[in-house]
Amino acid sequence: MKLKGQRSIVDDETEEEMEGTEFSTPAVRIVVGYALTSKKRKSFLQPKFICLASVKGIDFVAIDLKRPLSEQGPFNVILHKLTSKEWPQVIEEYRQIHPEVIIVDSPDAIRYVSNRQTMLEVVGDLKLPDCYGKVCVPKQLVISEDLNSVVAEVSKAGLRAPLVVKPLVVDGSAKSHELFLAYDHFSLLELPVPVVLQEFVNHGGVLFKVFIVGESINVVKRFSLPDITKSDLSKVSGVFRFPRVSCASASADGADLDPSVSELPPQPLLEMLAREVHHRMGLRLFNIDIIRQYGTKDVYYVIDINYFPGYAKMPEYERIFTDFILNLVESKS
């Protein structure tokens, strides 16, 4: 089944996958308006997902950013991820006029993860029980202005090299995801500000990406940066750009790894963490990047939180996201 006006994005292979399956078309359609960057739209609205959603009664309609939002719709749900500074006010004004429409997620919730300082402060303030493991955040420092004092500030804060260097603001651009590794304090003078400095934690070269869609939690393993020894620090200096880590092509699922490194964090721990982050931030669509400190069994570090991540990298995202939308609308009625 194809949505009117979207024939070109549903390919023959997707139709063949859907053939032979019995579906009953819902009498009432759910309209999901979406305002996404072109990159997010291409990765998220895959043909198979659109087909499955359609047979479940869900239609996706692009929001025209050149027209007033109040003149469009009606919508049951709005999904959005845009980088413009004006959009949060647009969606907030719309929400006040149309409280019956479910906005995923609210601009206030997204602001938490638009700043790498505040996103981890929320996790650092959590008082989670240690029964399934200890959840920490790396020691970090924000350098917002003058780099001339950065060496003194880093020493005062007690941060030890190597240091992960991340842009302070996360705005969805490629630049906001440029990461560096500094092997010594003096090399930090070369970097643009504002940035967040985080102590690098050895973690066996494996990162766990925890995808949250409402109450659904799914974990995938990704290869990450290798551990750094004292010998490495004595031989290397300077700042180096990260290779792109944790992307789908760096999947570690199925790899022959040491179980002490590759074993997934306990599900109860992830459920507890996801629930608390949701309650504190108000987010329903996010992922948490977690590492296990090398040499430990149950000491974990949250190193990043992202709003509306690349769900197409998550197994069965089509079914999970379709169920999420259905549950949202049902709970609203």
Image (cartoon, helix red, strand yellow):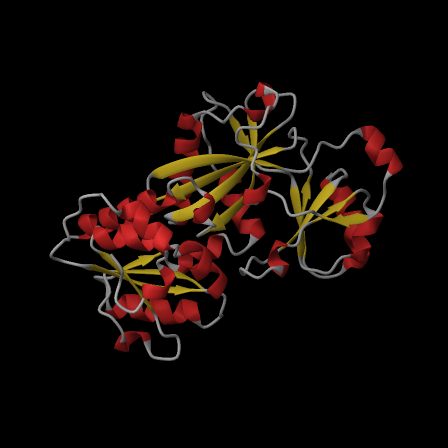
Q: Between residue 40 and residue 76, name the one nearer to us.
A: 40
Residue at image position (45%, 60%) is 42
Residue at image position (56%, 25%) is 262
Q: Quadrant of residue 255?
A: top right
User: Quadrant where the N terminus lies?
Assistant: bottom left
| In the depicted structure, whether residue 18 falls above or below residue 3 | above
Residue at image position (70%, 60%) is 193
Q: Position of residue 50 (x, y in %)?
A: 32, 55
176 sits left or right of 180 in the view: left
Residue at image position (37%, 72%) is 90
Q: Position of residue 290 (x, y in %)?
A: 54, 36
**Which residue is situated farthest in the right direction here?**
235
Can you see residue 48? Answer: no
Q: Between residue 312 and residue 166, name the one nearer to us.
A: 312
230 sits left or right of 144 in the view: right
| In the depicted structure, whether residue 295 falls above or below residue 105 | above
Q: Position of residue 31 (x, y in %)?
A: 24, 62
